[in-house]
Each structure stands twice: as structure tokens, then as C-alpha cells.
Image (cartoon, rainbow, N blue to C red):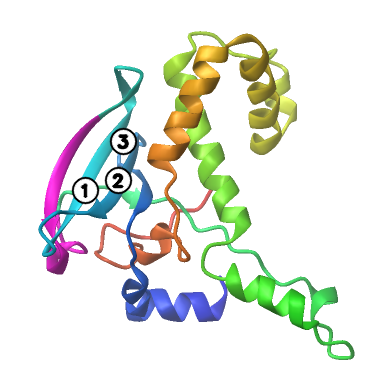
Amino acid sequence: MNLGIEYLVRTGTIKNFLKVPCSLCLETSQRSKVVATLDNHPNHNFYRVTQWDLENLENDLPAHEEHKVLKSEIFTSDILEGTPIYYKERPIETHCNHYAHPMDRDTYNYFLSNYLNSEHHKSSRMVWLWRAFVKLCFSIPLLDIRYYERRYSKRIMECEQIIVMKYHRPEWKLWHSWERKLLKSGPVAAELIFSSSSSSFSWLSD
């Protein structure tokens, strides 16, 4: 892990970066998937926290429960049960910052703006949610079973999405609704922000 990111997480300084709305992808000890979305509450002392159970459908969306949590207790509340999925950072390639050729300003600004919420991590969150969506909304595999053995997860998602877009228009429209509601993202990944909030929030490896 990048030492700068590790320092922010281990010291808890990363918690200062929390901004809502945002969403947090979690896995429980039973390996079930949960998304927690955090939004502002009419009472400014609270956050509105919605727990989405990705194992069960309710009116085409994951079953969910809404809670209000004191802002001062958001990192200790037992409402947020589970472990955040692993943060996928984007290391700086050697050729971008060689000792004989420092990176240019545009490259530097790109890495800086994505440092705590990389495009790699955003893609990983989408693949993670897509797997849950397919599991709940389709009773059979969308691709030949052999394809799943030979391809990596992002490529599988891309191929499945082409099929859903062409032949399952209602489900494709529904997927966009899942994206809007469950993949809320800020300048800092919520999985990083909550990774040090309690002993139950530890790093997950793939």
C-alpha cells in the first residue's frame, strides 16, 4: 500500500475527508454484500444512512432500511456492519516519474486528483455491484460458462452488459437506477474513510 495512504488510514486522519452523499461497499463475515449510502438529514446533527441488502430484492431494488445516525457517532455506530472492500489504488508508473524525467504538470495533477479515489477503485466498485445485480436479476449465466473461467472480472462485466443492453432493456434501465442510488462517490473513497473506524473494519485482500 502507498505509504501516504497507509499513514492517513492508520492515524485516522482519513476520517476528516468524509463528505456526503457517498456510498460504502461492505462485505459481512458471511461474505454477503451490503451497500451503505450516507446522505444529509433534515436535522443537521444526523446523517441519513440507508443499508441496502444486495442478497434480496424489493420492488426491483435491493431490500433496504433507513436509519438516522448522529454525525459524532458515524464511525462507531453498529449500523455500519461489515468490512469495506479493499481499496484499489493507482500506483504511479515508473516511466511517469523517472529520476531523469519528472512527470509533467498535467500528469501530476491527474494523479493528485485521483490519489484517494482512483479510477481503478471506482471500476472495482462497479464490477462488485454488477456481480450482485446479475446474481439477483438473472436466474441463469449470461455468458457461456467457459467464458467465466478464461476472462478477468471487468471483461466479463463488459460482455454481460452488452448482452443486457441489447436483449434485456428493462434490466438495463434498472441497472442505471442501481448505479445512481448505490455508487455515490466523492473525492475520497468511502472505503478508505471507514477502513480504520473500528476493529471490524480491516483491509480485505482479493
Instruction: Please tell me how crowded label 1 is: few (under 14), some (14-19), or many (20+) other residues with Cα within 10 Å.
Output: many
Q: Quadrant of residue 202?
A: bottom left
Quarter of the image containing the N terminus?
Answer: bottom right
Instruction: Please tell me how crowded label 3 is: few (under 14), some (14-19), or many (20+) other residues with Cα within 10 Å.
Output: few
Question: Where is 6 relative to 57, above or below?
Answer: below
Regarding mark 1 in the picture, which secondary structure is present there? strand
Q: Amino acid type of disc 1?
A: Val
Regarding mark 2 in the picture, which secondary structure is present there? strand
Indicate which label's residue lies in the foreground, 1 or 3.
1
Residue denoted by label 2: 36
Q: Amino acid type of disc 2?
A: Ala
* Image disc number at residue 30: 3
Q: Position of residue 204 (x, y in %)?
A: 44, 54
Is residue 69 magenta-colored?
yes
Q: Is residue 92 left or right of residue 54?
A: right
Instruction: Give the distance between the C-alpha atoms of the residues marked 2 and 1, in whole angstroms.
Output: 7 Å
Q: Position of residue 149 (x, y in %)?
A: 70, 25
Magenta residue span: 64-77
* Image disc number at residue 49: 1
